[in-house]
Amino acid sequence: MKAISVRQPWAWLIANGYKDIENRTWSTKYRGPVLIHASARRITSAEYDAAFNVVIDYEQKTGRTVIFPPLSNFQAASWRGAIVGVATITGCIAESASPWFSGPYGFTLEAARPLSHRPMKGRLSFFETNERPHKKFALVVPESYQDATEQEEVANHEK
């Protein structure tokens, strides 16, 4: 499965279903699932404060409350350099009134969910991981992996 590296705290905001646009300097025609990789770069307090201000704007515009983790969480090694979630890219836009959009391009995201952090080296652009989300649990597993719980999940969907 493809993945895309995103700096914290933006990766957390995407994986937890708040940030539904990922900004890039380049466009994409790709549509489909993508693993969210939190880059290994350590976040600064200024970057955290800037993100916090966007979260406040988002809360005011949507009425949703974000339980935003403290800076120390985002600076922890276990929160960086890892797959942290999955989402579906549904489009690529060049403008939006969303507080998450800063352009010049934004990948629109849906169906995001967090996954247990799986350490992995990131790369620029989209990159192949040979990993995928487990069909039942919030885990990242090799693409070829399947266990009985996944077979049960498939059987339940077919009923």
Image (cartoon, rainbow, N blue to C red):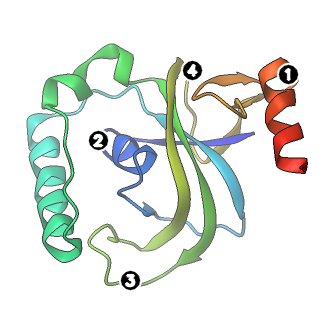
Residue 156: x percent and y percent?
Answer: 82, 42
Secondary element at image label 2? loop
Say whether marks 2 and 4 touch (CB < 8 Å). no
Disc assigned to residue 129? none
Q: Which residue type carries mark 3?
A: Ser
Quadrant (top left, top right, bottom left, bottom right) of the N terminus: top right
Residue flagged by tag 2: what amino acid is it? Pro
Q: Secondary structure at mark 1?
A: loop
What residue do we see at 38% from left, 83% from top? 96
**Whole-number angstrom distance, CA of label 2 to CA of label 3:** 21 Å
Task: Please tell me which residue lies in front, 151 or 44.
Answer: 151
Give the spatial CA distance, label 1 vs label 3. 40 Å
The Cα–Cα distance between marks 3 and 4, rounded to whole angstroms, is 32 Å
Q: Earlier in the sequence, mark 2 or mark 1?
A: 2
Checking the image for residue 9, the label placed there is 2
Image quadrant assignment for residue 102? bottom left
Q: CA distance from mark 2 to mark 1?
A: 31 Å
- Mark 4 lies on a secondary structure that is loop
Disc on the earlier residue, 1 or 3: 3
Asked if residue 82 lies left or right of residue 54, the reply is right
Q: Earlier in the sequence, mark 2 or mark 3?
A: 2
Q: Which label was assigned to residue 96?
A: 3
Q: Residue, x 51% and y 44% (percent of image)?
A: 113
Mark found first going from the N terminus, 4 or 1? 4
For mark 3, give the secondary structure.
Answer: loop
Q: Amino acid at mark 4?
A: Met
Give the numbered dot on residue 146: 1
Disc 4 designates what residue? Answer: 120
Mark earlier in primary sequence (3, 4): 3
The Cα–Cα distance between marks 2 and 4, rounded to whole angstroms, is 17 Å
